[in-house]
Amino acid sequence: MQKEIKHTFYFSQTPEEVWAYLTKPELMEQWLMPSDFQPVVGYHFRFTNPGGLTFTICEVLEVKPFTDLSYVWKNDWSKTKTPFTSKVNWTLTSIEGGTELLLVHSGFELFKDLTAHNGGWIFLCNKLGELLKASAK
Amino acid sequence: MRTQTLDAFQVIADPSRRHMLQLLSKKSLTINSLAGNFDMSRPAVSKHIKVLYSAGFISITGIGRERHCILKQDGFNELQDFINYFDNFWITKLKKLQTILNNKSK
C-alpha cells in the first residue's frame, strides 16, 4: 500500500534560494500558508489554514540547511473529532541548472495497521500510484 | 459504545475494527467466525460490525442460515479522498512556488 505522497519539482534557482522559500515565513506565505515557522529543531509552530479559522499544528524535526527539512504535520486535536498526524519531508538536491525538490508527506497514523497485506487497499494503491505517476515529471 | 454513524476516520480509529477489516480483506467471514478472532463478548462484536456496516466498510449478506460480512468500497473511498486532498494540496502549492520562482528569475 502506498501510504505516502511524493512529488519531485525542479527549479532553476539554487538550493539556497529554494530553501529560503521553505523556511522564511514571509516567503512561505506567498505560496503555502502563513506561519510562525523557525528553522530550529524542536520548535513548535503552526500554519494558518485557508479561511483563517483552523491551524495545521507542526513541530520541526530536522533542519540541514539547503538540503533537508522535516516537520510533524497534524490537525488541531483540541478542535477535531478526527485527529491525524503525519510528517512532511523536504529534500533539496543541487542539480545542473538548478535544484531538485522532493516532497514526501508520509506517516499518516490512521493507516498504520491497515497497510500490510490488505487486499481491500489494493484498489487504493493502484489509484494513488496512477495519480503519482500522472503528476510525476 | 453508541452506534451512531461515525465518519471513516472514527471508524478505523478503533484497533478492533481495523483488525476486523484486515481479516475481511483476506476473505469474507460469517459474523460467528469473525467473532471467534476476538476476545470480547458477542454483543460487543456485533456493535463493531454495526459501526463498520453503517459507515459503508462492509456489507452483510445472508447465505443460508449464516450472515456473511463482506468488505465494501464505500467506506474506503472517504479515506482515499483524504490522501487525495493532500496530494492535490501539495501539487497546487508547489506549482504556485514554481510560478513565483520562475517570475523572479525573469
Image (cartoon, coloured by chain):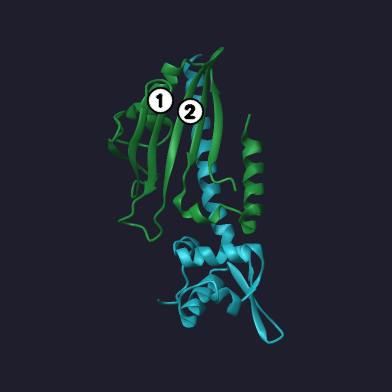
Q: In front here: B63 or A137?
A: B63
Residue at image point 67% right, 48% down = A126
Is residue B78 in view from this perspective?
yes
Q: In this view, does B19 lie above or below B3?
A: above
Image location of residue A5, percent across then percent down: 54, 40
The residue wearing badge 1 is: A21
Is residue A27 in view from this perspective?
no
Give the residue furthest to the right: B64
Q: Mark 1 lies on which chain?
A: A
Q: How far apart are marks 1 and 2 (CA)?
A: 8 Å
**Direction from residue B2 to residue B68 in the image, left or right:** right
Q: Quadrant of residue A135?
A: top right
Tell me the amino acid under the disc marked 1: Tyr
Tag 2 secondary structure: helix
Q: Are marks 1 and 2 on the same chain?
A: no
Judge the density around disc 2: few (<14), some (14-19), many (≥20) Cα neighbours within 10 Å: many
Q: Which chain carries label 2?
A: B
Q: Is residue A61 above or below residue B54?
A: above
The residue wearing badge 2 is: B97
Q: In which quarter of the image is the N terminus of chain B?
A: bottom left
User: Quick check: marks 1 and 2 in contact, CB under 8 Å?
Assistant: yes
**Direction from residue A53 to residue A104 in the image, left or right:** right
Residue at image point 47% right, 17% down = B104
Image location of residue B25, percent across then percent down: 63, 62
Tell me the amino acid under the disc marked 2: Leu
Colour used to depict chain B in the structure image: cyan
The green chain is A
Q: Which label number is shown at residue B9?
A: none
Tag 1 secondary structure: helix
